[in-house]
Image (cartoon, rainbow, N blue to C red):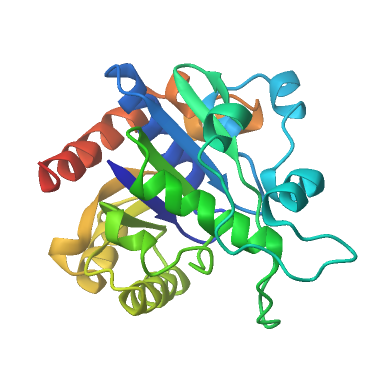
Amino acid sequence: MKIAVTGKGGVGKTTFAATLARLYAEEGKNVLAADVDPDANLGLALGFPEDLLDSIVPITKMRKLVQERTGANDDNKFYKINPKVSDIPDTYSKTYNGVKLLVLGTVDTAGSGCVCPEHVMLKRIINHLVLRSSDVVILDMEAGLEHLGRGTTDGMDQFVVVIEPGARSIQTYKNVKRLAEGLGVKQVRVVANKVRNEADEEFISSRIPAEDLLGFIHYNEEVIDADRQGKSPFDFSEKAVSEIIKIKEKIDKSNS
């Protein structure tokens, strides 16, 4: 199972991605969660201790590793576009609560059109995780899909956009759907988070096609408390976990 979770900052996509990862790990699956968000906090949501997270350097910040694998350096502007990355997930991930965490970091390519060695490494690692890894892979990504190549998406089982009730979130879903279609992705599913009442549910249901809507996660003070304490929502809120279990069942069913 390969799942890319996207959405704008603050909508709760990391909470969803982390809980999904913990659920698969609880089933005894080998789970690798990759953090590809510039505001990297997937580790905290997975329940990793802060001292362990402090020891992790994002792959895109490992200049020596990037230079060694791509052949690029200050004197050489030419570099390999297919560097070896197959050993990176096992070598540079950390494991806690049964989940392997790989912090990839990100590369700002917005508006520059730059394809730098770090960006090449990032795309190659994601490609490896999606197409070759035997693990359950969950990618926690920002709302843009710049780091996904056309070939990578062939192995993706689910694109999930986490939104909240509001016009801007609906726009994010439409933007991701358009970007995904450009990469050859046929289906983009939606999880609605921070849903407060029936009016919110009706708002979402009237704007998202029924076949794309995986389910609702309701507004939950326990999840906010977990975030405030830097803890995993999985360990804090039975209600949130039970709602995400129902969503997971739909994901599993559509891939069976």
Q: Residue furthest right?
A: 75
Q: Nearer the viewer, residue 18 or 30?
A: 30
Judge whether 256 appears above or below 236 on screen.
below
Q: Residue at x 43, y 41 (%)?
A: 17
Q: Quadrant of residue 246?
A: top left
Judge whether 241 appears above or below 180 on screen.
above
Q: Residue at x 50, y 64 (%)?
A: 143
Residue 44 in view of the camera: yes
Residue 195 in view of the camera: no
Where, quadrant-wise, is the N terminus in this rendering? Answer: top left
Q: Residue at x 25, y 54 (%)?
A: 198
The reply, left or right, for residue 164 in relation to residue 23 is right
Where, quadrant-wise, is the C terminus in this rendering? Answer: top left
Residue 79 position, x and y percent, is 70, 65
The reply, left or right, for residue 129 in relation to residue 213 is right
The reply, left or right, for residue 128 in relation to residue 39 is left
Residue 43 position, x and y percent, is 59, 32
Residue 199 position, x and y percent, is 28, 61
Q: Nearer the viewer, residue 167 or 138?
A: 138
Q: Quadrant of residue 179?
A: bottom left
Q: Residue at x 66, y 76 (%)?
A: 110
How many numbered marks appear?
0
The reply, left or right, for residue 51 in relation to residue 29 is right
Judge whether 51 appears above or below 215 on screen.
above
Residue 134 position, x and y percent, is 32, 34
Q: Quadrant of residue 127?
A: bottom left
